[in-house]
Image (spheres, rainbow, N blue to C red):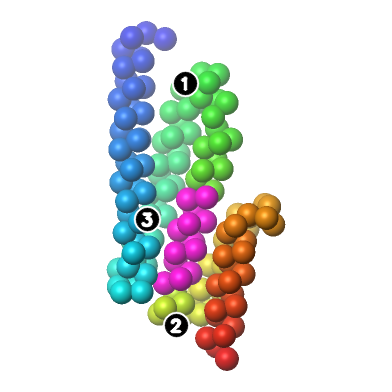
């Protein structure tokens, strides 16, 4: 690979890293507002979901351009983005529960379960707890 090719990959990697940090900050800020500002938190989780789609695609494209090493990182990257999506869905579920939108919250839980391939995944237990919360709130 030429030096200019390496330079552009480095710039692209830095850009993705910066965007990823902003994405993580967005998730943190959304989670902090679940109870105090649920409508704002919901909008932030929706925005984070949109960002996740773009960022994941950009990151996977970068890895594909990085040759064998990049290709070896794809599975780990896919797992990382799956966890990010679960985090978004868990946060969104919490917001919907706070807003009293229990059927919508259950729908999000159902979507999140589709991402879980291991019953020992901590997210599975969190989803169970959120379902119990919904059942109790409806009672």
Residue with the mark numbered 1: 66
Residue 100 screen position, x and y as percent: 44, 82
Residue 75 drawn above or below residue 3: below
Residue 62 drawn above or below residue 87: above
**Would you say 124 lies left or right of 85 here?**
right
Of the 4 image quadrants, the one containing the N terminus is top left
Residue at 69% over, 57% down: 119
Residues at marks 1 and 3 touching, judged by CB atoms closer than 8 Å: no
> Badge 1, how many Cα within 10 Å: few under 14, some, many 20+?
some
Q: Which residues are magenta?
A: 83-95
Residue 89 screen position, x and y as percent: 49, 61
Q: Earlier in the sequence, mark 1 or mark 3?
A: 3
Q: Is residue 85 part of the magenta span, yes or no?
A: yes
Of the 4 image quadrants, the one containing the C terminus is bottom right
Residue with the mark numbered 2: 100
Q: Count numbered badges in the picture.
A: 3
Residue at 55% over, 79% down: 133
Residue 108 drawn above or below residue 60: below
Residue with the mark numbered 3: 27
Tell me if residue 39 can be seen.
Answer: no
């Amino acid at each position: 690979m030429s030096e200019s090719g390496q330079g552009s990959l480095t710039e692209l990697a830095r850009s993705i890293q910066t965007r990823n940090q902003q994405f993580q900050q967005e998730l943190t800020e959304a989670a902090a507002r679940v109870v105090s500002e649920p409508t704002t938190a919901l909008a932030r989780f929706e925005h984070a979901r949109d960002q996740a789609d773009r960022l994941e695609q950009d990151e996977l494209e970068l890895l594909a351009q990085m040759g064998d090493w990049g290709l070896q990182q794809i599975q780990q990257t896919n797992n990382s983005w799956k966890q990010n999506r679960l985090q978004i869905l868990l946060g969104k579920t919490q917001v919907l529960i706070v807003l009293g939108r229990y059927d919508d919250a259950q729908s999000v839980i159902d979507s999140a379960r589709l991402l879980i391939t291991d019953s020992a995944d901590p997210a599975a237990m969190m989803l169970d707890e959120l379902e119990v919360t919904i059942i109790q709130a409806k009672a």
